[in-house]
Image (cartoon, rainbow, N blue to C red):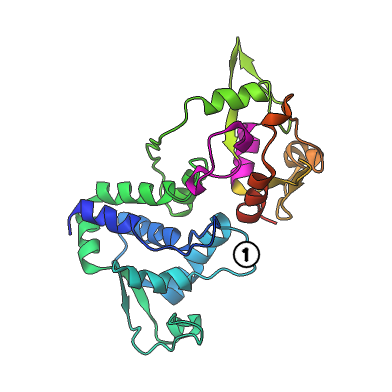
């Protein structure tokens, strides 16, 4: 296998698909393994001692809000993509509904998993390739504001190039529609005539076909932009701000978040630029931490 063939195989990993719902299980499992390889981990990972804890936390922090999180799914299913190896899995009893092994079976038989021998050797011999693949995996599934948090959770401190195609008009059109102010707090700091710390945020992520149009954008200060992408804040169909029940903190959190709870967005003057309710609903369903 060549590096290019590996890139194709990684990008070709089959993901669970239903409409435009987020399913970052396999990307986070692969990112976890590659990040650990970069740090010198061996080829195989213990489900019981490592994956069940570490990937569960990644899914909880960076995946959609769910009643339960299942790191056993990507750990087992990556084998079917031809890039993953499982040891001690032969005697695992599958679920009644599919061929997946139960979590209890993975623990009972002390199953370990990791990239195939060929892929592991490639990644071991080429750290830069591993870094590039990690960047590709994460940038395909998450906005760039979130990627540094994921890599930090994975124990890495480097930053990626994050070179992506952008609509050069998106930021200008969104900030103009909102009159150069944060749609939540009204922040509008300038140095002379240059806005700073104000960004054009996508409501529905580009990674899930969110368009670069004003109806899918919000002018937000850097704090509220990060909060939107992390699922700390959302909006109902009346454009009222809603907060995650998990949010907590002191005086500054009160000032930046709780004081705005239930208040309406500062909307554009022209209704044609209002946020699309369908994009807000996607964000509330797939990103917002209820």
The residue that appears at 49% across and 84% down in the rendered structure is 104
Residue 270 occupies which quadrant of the picture?
Answer: top right
Region of the chain picked out in magenta, as a range: 203-229
- Taking 112 as reference, is 128 left or right? left
Q: Secondary structure at mark 1?
A: loop
**Residue 37 shows in this picture:** yes
- Taking 97 as reference, is 203 left or right? right
Q: Quadrant of the C terminus?
A: bottom right
Q: Dot 1, how many residues are within 10 Å of its Cα: few (below 14), some (14-19), or many (20+)?
A: few
For the residue pair 51 and 194, the one nearer the viewer reads as 194
The residue that appears at 63% across and 45% down in the rendered structure is 279
Q: Is residue 224 above or below residue 82?
A: above
**Residue 197 shows in this picture:** no
Q: Position of residue 217 (x, y in %)?
A: 61, 35
For the residue pair 23 and 189, the one nearer the viewer reads as 23
Q: Quadrant of the N terminus?
A: bottom left
Q: Position of residue 84 (x, y in %)?
A: 31, 69
For the residue pair 266 and 149, the one nearer the viewer reads as 266
Query: Is residue 5 a member of the stretch shown in magenta?
Result: no
Residue indicated by mark 1:
66
């Amino acid at each position: 296998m060549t590096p290019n063939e590996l890139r194709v195989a990684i990008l070709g990993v089959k993901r669970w698909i239903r409409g435009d719902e987020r399913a970052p299980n396999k990307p986070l499992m692969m990112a976890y393994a590659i990040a650990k390889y970069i740090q010198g981990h061996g080829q195989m990972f213990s489900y019981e001692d490592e994956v069940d804890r570490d990937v569960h936390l990644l899914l909880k922090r960076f995946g959609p809000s769910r009643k339960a999180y299942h790191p056993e799914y990507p750990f087992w299913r990556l084998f079917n993509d031809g890039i993953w190896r499982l040891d001690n899995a032969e005697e695992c009893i599958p679920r009644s509904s599919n061929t997946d092994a139960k979590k209890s079976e993975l623990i009972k038989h002390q199953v370990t998993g990791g990239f195939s021998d060929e892929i592991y050797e490639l990644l071991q011999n080429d750290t830069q390739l591993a870094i590039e693949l990690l960047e590709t995996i994460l940038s395909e599934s998450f906005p760039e504001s979130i990627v540094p948090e994921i890599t930090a959770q994975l124990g890495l401190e480097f930053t990626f190039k994050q070179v992506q195609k952008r609509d050069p008009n998106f930021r200008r059109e969104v900030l103009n529609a909102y009159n150069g102010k944060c749609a939540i707090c009204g922040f509008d700091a300038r140095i002379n005539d240059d806005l700073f710390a104000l960004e054009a945020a996508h409501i529905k992520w580009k990674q899930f076909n969110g368009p670069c149009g004003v109806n899918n954008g919000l002018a937000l200060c850097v704090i509220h932009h990060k909060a939107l992408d992390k699922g700390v804040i959302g909006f109902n169909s009346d454009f009222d701000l809603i907060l995650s029940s998990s949010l907590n903190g002191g005086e500054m959190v009160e000032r930046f978040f709780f004081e705005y709870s239930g208040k309406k967005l500062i909307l554009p003057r022209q209704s044609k630029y209002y946020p699309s309710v369908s994009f807000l609903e996607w964000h509330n369903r797939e990103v917002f931490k209820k």
